[in-house]
Image (cartoon, helix red, strand yellow):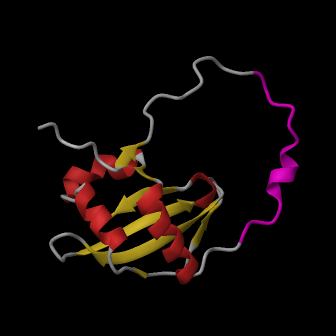
Amino acid sequence: MAEKPGKIVPFAKKPVAKTPSPPSKIDISASLAQREPPLDEEALRTAIDRIVMYGTIRETLHSARDRSYRNITERDILAMLEGKWSLEAPPEWDEQHRNWKYRLKGLDVAGDELVLIVAVQIEFNRIDIITKF
């Protein structure tokens, strides 16, 4: 019987655009408006529960590359996100990617402590796993 594909998908390794595009004429100053406040723990939990059930979880290249080295499986990540976890530190703003990073602490399948640093993209119904340890 064929193995069911995993829930966690990797980032694309090749850029989507095949040819360089001309400079944009869009005024980016509109996107530099005040950033949204971070989600509180209750709103974060609701968003993560919904995304785990209906959305996409994907790992950054850094996270996927370090997975085997750190012996953390997709099942460990899902077990933690589906189980009891807590916000280990205040959210941190990532200026480069213009999103909030959340440091979550919980347990993996074996009951060992697992820490994930994630970005929650509510508008895309997606969780990006930035790193794990």
Q: Main secondary structure of the magenta part?
A: loop
Q: Residue furthest left?
A: 1
Q: Residue 132: horizontal and vertical position, in percent?
A: 34, 63
Which image quarter is the N terminus in?
top left
Which image quarter is the C terminus in?
bottom left
Q: Residue 39: horizontal and vertical position, in percent?
A: 61, 75
Q: Residue at x 57, y 71 (%)?
A: 92
Q: Residue 35: horizontal and vertical position, in percent?
A: 75, 66
For residue 40, above or below residue 61: below
Q: Residue 36: horizontal and vertical position, in percent?
A: 72, 68
**Magenta residues?**
22-36
Q: Is residue 94 magenta?
A: no
Q: Residue at x 27, y 55 (%)?
A: 74
From where the camera sits, is residue 133 visible? no
Whether residue 119 sits left or right of residue 28 in the image: it is left
Q: Residue at x 28, y 52 (%)?
A: 66
For residue 41, above or below residue 18: below
From where the camera sits, is residue 125 visible? yes
Q: Residue furthest top?
A: 19
Q: Residue at x 29, y 47 (%)?
A: 6
